[in-house]
Image (tube, grey):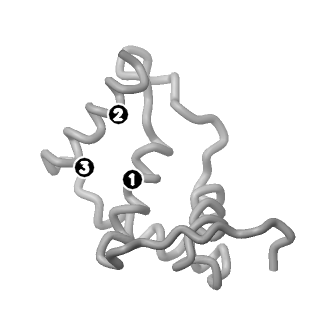
Amino acid sequence: SSLLPTGSIGLNNQNHQDKLVQLLYILQNLHNPKNRTEALFSGFSNINLAAILRHHFRDFADKKSNTIEKNAKASIAKLKNNDPKVQKLILALEEFFYA
């Protein structure tokens, strides 16, 4: 149990749960396209990703962090980096943050 208050963000469509995790993963791994060593975040681990989900989203609030991490890994494994939609999203985020 956490001493911090948890958020109450809910997904309107449960089918988007994998996509939410995948989006956070994409942000976690976003780098400056002109300098690949410059990441958007420092210290954003899978533990942090699980904590964000657990503390801010209702669907994860009652789960243990290691369960969330395991489920997140399964969602991330479904991410197809060569999918044109995913590539477009990454390019748009790179342009947004680094252009």
- For the point 26% across and 41% down, which residue is it? 89
Tell which residue pokes out farthest to the left in this image. Answer: 84
Q: Position of residue 28 (x, y in %)?
A: 50, 45
From mark 3 to mark 1, how far is it between C-alphas? Answer: 12 Å
Mark 2 / mark 3, whichever is N-terminal: 3
Image spot of residue 78 (x, y percent): 29, 66
Q: Are marks 2 and 3 in contact (CB under 8 Å)?
A: no
Distance, label 2 to label 3, CA atoms, is 14 Å
Labels 2 and 1 touching (C-beta < 8 A): no
The answer to whether 46 appears left or right of 83 in the picture is right
Q: Is residue 84 left or right of residue 11?
A: left
| Quadrant into which the N terminus falls | bottom right
Residue type at the position of mark 2: Leu
Label 1 secondary element: helix
Residue located beneath label 2 in the image: 93
Q: Is residue 22 left or right of residue 48?
A: left
Looking at the image, is mark 2 or mark 3 nearer the viewer?
Answer: 2
Pick the residue in front: 81 or 10: 10
Local crowd size for mark 1, using a 10 Å CA cut-off: few (<14), some (14–19), many (≥20) = some
Q: Is residue 41 above or below residue 81?
A: above
Q: In terms of sequence position, does the residue under pointer 3 or pointer 1 come before the other?
A: 1
**What residue appears at the point 40 percent right and 47 percent down from the top-left corner?**
26
- Secondary structure type for disc 3: loop
From the top left corner, tell me how far across and down residue 97 is, in percent: 42, 25
Dot 1 amino acid type: Leu
Q: Quadrant of residue 63?
A: bottom right
* Residue holding disc 1: 23
- Mark on residue 81? 3
Tell me if mark 2 has few (under 14), some (14-19) or many (20+) residues whose alpha carbon lies within 10 angstroms of its own. Answer: some
On-image quarter of the C terminus:
top left
Image height check: is 83 above or below 1? above
